[in-house]
Image: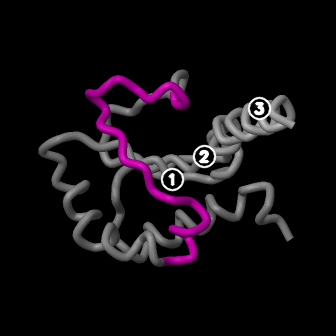
């Protein structure tokens, strides 16, 4: 019985380490940098409500400063020097980008178009 519990505990730990990679299939990466006026404008107009929207639930936001080292799961991602740049990811695969912040209405339209490209969104 003790050995069975040890094996089960080990399997649970392995699953806990592996599942987060697969649990969050879609993600919106926001490339930003200090002093970016349009990043601040996006934060003011969209940032507060984004997590509450259907889009935010489908593709949660993760901000990445272009001057910081990339997180391990984003190594190999081409970093734009133009900020903000929004990248829709499906796991570790880039679906598409929005370069710049064109205002709230156009942003939602462009984001919706990219999210429709996600494999689980095809109807």
- Which region shows up in magenta? 53-74
Q: Residues within 10 Å of mark 1 (few under 14, many from 20)?
A: many
Give the spatial CA distance, label 1 vs label 3: 38 Å
Does 65 appear in magenta? yes
Q: Which of pointers 2 and 3 lies earlier in the amino acid sequence? A: 3
Q: Which residue is mark 3?
A: 6
Vertical arrangement, residue 105 with respect to residue 9, above or below: below
**Image quarter (top left, top right, bottom left or bottom right) of the C terminus:** bottom right
Q: Which of pointers 1 and 3 lies earlier in the amino acid sequence? A: 3
Residue 24 image offset from top left, x and y in percent: 63, 51
Residue 14 placement, left or right of 68? right
Which numbered marker is on residue 28?
1
Residue 8 image offset from top left, x and y in percent: 80, 38
Instruction: Check disc 3 and report its element: helix, strand or loop.
Output: helix
Q: Which residue is mark 2?
A: 89
Q: Which of pointers 1 and 2 lies earlier in the amino acid sequence? A: 1
Q: Residues within 10 Å of mark 3 (few under 14, many from 20)?
A: few
Does 98 appear in magenta? no
Residue 60 image offset from top left, x and y in percent: 51, 59
Place residue 42 in its image quadrant: bottom left
Instruction: Say whether marks 1 and 2 touch (CB < 8 Å).
Output: yes
């Amino acid at each position: 019985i003790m050995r069975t519990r040890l094996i089960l505990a080990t399997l649970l730990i392995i699953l806990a380490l592996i599942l987060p990679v697969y649990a969050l299939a879609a993600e919106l990466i926001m490339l930003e940098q200090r002093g970016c006026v349009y990043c601040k404008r996006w934060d003011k107009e969209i940032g507060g409500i984004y997590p509450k929207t259907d889009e935010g639930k489908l593709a949660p936001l993760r901000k990445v400063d272009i001057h910081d080292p990339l997180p391990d799961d984003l190594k190999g991602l081409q970093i734009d020097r133009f900020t903000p740049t929004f990248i829709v990811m499906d796991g570790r695969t880039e679906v598409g980008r929005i370069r710049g912040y064109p205002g709230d209405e156009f942003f939602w339209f462009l984001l919706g178009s990219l999210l429709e490209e996600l494999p689980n969104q095809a109807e």
